[in-house]
Image (spheres, rainbow, N blue to C red):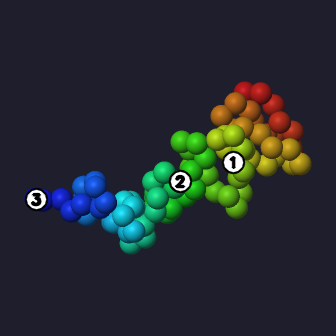
Amino acid sequence: MVLPICGATTYNPDTHVCKDNAILAKCEEATYNPDTHVCKDNAILTKCGEDAYNPASQICRGNIVLVKCGWALYNPKTQVCRDNAVFAK
């Protein structure tokens, strides 16, 4: 199979599309930029560093996903939220 070219790069049309000389990944029928987004469970999510996050319920600061805990923010990789208070794991 001969792969199509987008700009100067070949791509797999089963998993990607070419738009304005940029290769975009497919997620179900939608397309996304894999540098800024990720496809998880057929939904396109925004990237925060290498992790996916939901901007409606989470915040990305310094490539770290932070979650609300009462009035504070916490990093669920290193902290836990109990009774609206943040504690180290």
> Residue 17, position in %: x, y?
33, 66
Among numbered discs 3 and 2, the one appearing first in the sequence: 3
Mark 3 surroundings: few (<14), some (14-19) or many (≥20) residues within 10 A: few
Among numbered discs 2 and 1, the one appearing first in the sequence: 2
Mark 1 surroundings: few (<14), some (14-19) or many (≥20) residues within 10 A: some
Image mark for residue 33: none
Q: Residue at point 55% right, 58% down?
A: 45
Q: Going by the picture, which residue comes out furthest to the bottom?
A: 29
Callout 1 touching callout 3 (CB < 8 Å): no
Q: Find disc 1 in the rendering and name its residue.
A: 60
Can residue 26 be seen here? The reply is: no
Q: Disc 3 and disc 2: Cα gap in Å?
A: 29 Å
Q: Residue at point 46% right, 63% down?
A: 32
Q: Nearer the viewer, residue 82 or 55?
A: 55
Q: Residue at point 58% right, 42% down?
A: 49
Q: Disc 1 and disc 3: Cα gap in Å?
A: 41 Å
Q: Find disc 2 in the rendering and name its residue.
A: 36
Image mark for residue 1: 3
> Residue 4, position in %: x, y?
21, 62
**Quadrant of res 61:** top right
Q: Nearer the viewer, residue 43 or 49?
A: 49
Task: Tell me the mark number nearer the camera, choosing from 2 and 1.
Answer: 2
Can residue 54 be seen here? The reply is: yes
Q: Amino acid at mark 1?
A: Cys
Q: Circle 3 — which element?
A: loop
> Residue 88, position in %: x, y?
77, 27
Q: Disc 2 and disc 1: Cα gap in Å?
A: 12 Å
Mark 2 surroundings: few (<14), some (14-19) or many (≥20) residues within 10 A: few
Count of numbered marks: 3
Q: Circle 1 — which element?
A: strand
Callout 2 touching callout 1 (CB < 8 Å): no
Q: Amino acid at mark 3?
A: Met
